[in-house]
């Protein structure tokens, strides 16, 4: 698979090799949020669809007033997947990109490792802000340190010496909050870039409301992301005991009053 656009020729061959790793394809899709080439490819696909003609009106969909709402993605579930650690199965190239962004986020926010340590209370063995080896942790479930950053060869031996998996219980709330802030900022910045591009494609794209996604999954972070768009249209699956509980709370349906 050839890159459509290369802002960094030095990494182009490595990017192509990462995309050819079929075993990581599902996790690699998450990287469209932080990888410029994947983002550009996603926008190119969207642009082709927006320029498709409506056979009934002859107008491009991007200009057609019959298209009342535009949506960037449908049920992407990005925050859920990322907090669940699915990014760990992406190709190493994309994991390194993500962890480099994480290090840059921490450097901008705290300015120094001393300030970072003061906020978090401590760093784990092998973590070094200057060397880019601060673990992207905690995740939703406890995970071994070596799985959280296996792209930094200098720190791997120290990570392997950390006893037990790292979870929320091993970290201060400030650290967990920074993980969520970083991921959410990364996602919203991506959505806003895509939204700005989509609004240049035609009259309907420019004037109709744009929603960023639909999937929420009972996630307040996803709800916050959706609120950055022109409108909110989300879905959340409820079945089994959840719907039974909802029916119980609502009580029996009352008959409609008779018309006088």
Image (cartoon, helix red, strand yellow):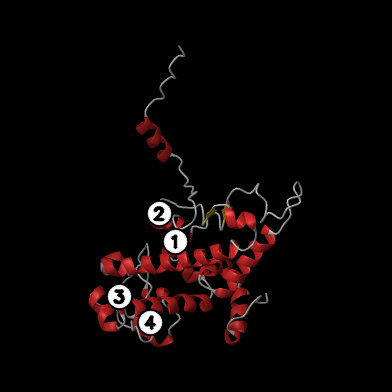
User: Residue at label 1?
Assistant: 79
Secondary structure, mark 1, is helix
Q: Mark 1 or 3 closer to N-term?
A: 1
Dot in front, 1 or 4: 1
226 vs 100, nearest the viewer = 226
Q: Mark 1 or 2 closer to N-term?
A: 1
Q: Give the answer, above or below, for where 256 lies relative to 206.
A: above
Q: Give the answer, above or below, for where 122 lies relative to 26.
A: below
Secondary structure, mark 2, is loop
Camera sees residue 167: no
What separation in Å lies between label 4 and label 3 (alpha carbons)?
18 Å
Q: Which mark is residue 133?
A: 4
What separation in Å lies between label 1 and label 2 (alpha carbons)?
8 Å
Secondary structure, mark 4, is loop
Q: Mark 2 or 3 closer to N-term?
A: 3
In percent of the image, x 44 and y 55: which residue is there?
Answer: 227
In percent of the image, x 45 and y 14: which residue is there?
Answer: 258
Across and down, in percent, residue 71 comes to 56, 55
What separation in Å lies between label 1 and label 4 (alpha carbons)?
22 Å
User: Residue at label 3?
Assistant: 163
Q: Give the answer, above or below, for where 39 lies relative to 16.
A: above
What separation in Å lies between label 2 and label 3 (alpha carbons)?
31 Å
Dot in front, 4 or 3: 4
Secondary structure, mark 3, is loop
Dot in front, 2 or 4: 2
Horizontal relation, residue 198 to residue 176: left or right: right
User: Residue at label 2?
Assistant: 219
Dot in front, 1 or 3: 1
146 vs 175, nearest the viewer = 175
> Is the residue marked by circle 1 packed among few (<14), some (14-19), or many (20+) residues within 10 Å?
many
């Amino acid at each position: 698979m050839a890159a459509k656009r290369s802002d960094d020729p030095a990494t182009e061959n490595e990017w192509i090799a990462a995309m050819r790793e079929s075993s990581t394809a599902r996790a690699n899709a998450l990287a469209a949020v932080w990888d410029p080439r994947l983002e550009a490819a996603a926008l190119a696909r969207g642009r082709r669809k927006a320029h498709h003609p409506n056979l009934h009106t002859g107008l491009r969909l991007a200009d057609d007033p019959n298209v009342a709402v535009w949506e960037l993605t449908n049920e992407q579930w990005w925050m859920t997947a990322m907090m669940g650690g699915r990014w760990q199965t992406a190709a190493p190239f994309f994991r390194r990109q993500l962890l480099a962004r994480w290090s840059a986020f921490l450097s901008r926010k705290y300015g120094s490792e001393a300030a970072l340590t003061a906020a978090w209370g401590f760093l784990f063995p092998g973590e070094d802000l200057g060397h880019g080896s601060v673990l992207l942790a905690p995740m939703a479930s406890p995970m071994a340190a070596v799985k959280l950053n296996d792209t930094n060869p200098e720190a791997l031996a120290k990570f392997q010496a950390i006893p037990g998996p790292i979870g929320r219980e091993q970290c201060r709330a400030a650290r967990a909050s920074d993980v969520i802030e970083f991921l959410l900022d990364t996602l919203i910045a991506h959505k806003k870039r895509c939204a700005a591009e989509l609004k240049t494609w035609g009259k309907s794209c420019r004037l109709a409301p744009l929603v960023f996604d639909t999937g929420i999954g009972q996630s307040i972070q996803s709800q916050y992301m959706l609120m950055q768009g022109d409108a909110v249209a989300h879905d959340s699956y409820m079945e089994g005991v959840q719907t039974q509980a909802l029916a119980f709370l609502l009580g029996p349906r009352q008959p409609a009053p008779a018309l006088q």
